[in-house]
Image (cartoon, rainbow, N blue to C red):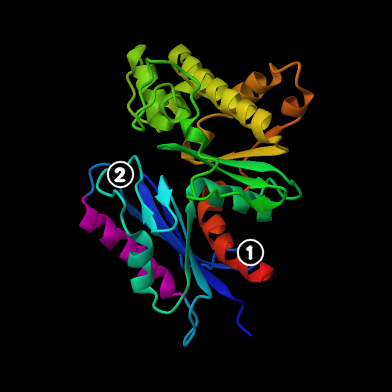
Amino acid sequence: MTAPLALAVDFGGTKVEAALVDDGGRLVPGSRARRGTGADAASAALDRAVAEVVRHALRAMPEQTAPVGVGIGSAGPLDLAAGTVSPLNVPAWRRHPLVDRVAGLVPDVPVTLALDGLCIALAEHWVGAGRGARNLLGMVVSTGVGGGLVLDGRPAPGPTGNAGHIGHVEVGGADDPCACGGSGCLEAVASGPGTVRWARAHGFTGTTGHDLARAHAAGDPIALAAVDRAGTAIGRAIASAAGLVDLDVAAVGGGFSRVSPALLEAARAALARRSAFDFVRRTRIVPSGLSDAGPLIGAAALVHLARRSD
């Protein structure tokens, strides 16, 4: 008998991916596809990119079979009831009916939408660095900063699907305006673009997170300060979340999270400063155990874990 396969879709500020994932959290070889998104992309182009990666993944399905479900993880904010997404870093999509678009590509298959940060949390709790933890924060540190919560062993999406969006906890000041309308948000301070922007304001000449990573490895003082600043902000936000919901683990993934091990070292140091709160300091900050496959595995978890609980 063929193992049940979920179609996983991950939509973010720089890319959309899709793949087939089995009920053990493993990606089906040859099913994964990726296309660019970005702040300048038009809505129709984004829809085409989603359709291309979905169709590529479906071609890897065994003959005469269909996925048991589709899981979509998307940058937020979301409206779960309407099935729409409004990613801050993708201006062309505001209340975009992503669930309906994907459902039209996979007729008669149930589609579930969740915040990409919640997908990261589910993936880490299921097969990643958070296995065995009852209370977990999953974080994406990339073009933006997102998050999601597993509390008492269960996903905690909130009524609109946006719970756990730690990227918009304020950790900075007025010098860090955020696209959400606030200032000092973790996303503005510690995302890849936010960190590079700060570094350039202080004399750094590179333009990307990769440039910053290379400069950090070479000991460039501005790059060292920029990564320390971002990591400290991440640690402060995690400490605040731990104070609010009493976390066991914070698992941090996303492309910029791998800029240097120093990023999470700075985060741990910031958390440790909550010296009076043992329950906060016990929170373990760990890198994702799933590398860049975490968002897809988490999107598939929306399907597979729901089937197990039925």
- At x 34%, y 23%, the residue is 206
Distance, label 1 to label 2, CA atoms, is 29 Å
Number of marks present in the image shown: 2
Q: Which mark is residue 134?
A: none
Q: Amino acid at mark 2?
A: Val
- Residue at the bottom extreme of this rendering: 64
Circle 2 is placed at which residue position?
A: 90
The boundaries of the magenta stretch are 42-60
Q: Is residue 88 magenta?
A: no
Circle 1 is placed at which residue position?
A: 305
- At x 56%, y 20%, the residue is 232
Q: Is residue 57 magenta?
A: yes
Q: Is residue 219 visible?
A: no
Q: Amino acid at mark 1?
A: Leu
- At x 37%, y 30%, the residue is 193
Instruction: Answer with left or right where residue 68 lies relative to residue 279.
Output: left
Where residue 67 appears, x then y in whole percent?
50, 75
Where residue 278 appears, x then y in whole percent?
78, 24
The quadrant of the picture occupied by the N terminus is: bottom right
- Residue at the right extreme of this rendering: 278
What kind of secondary structure does the magenta stretch mostly adopt?
Answer: helix
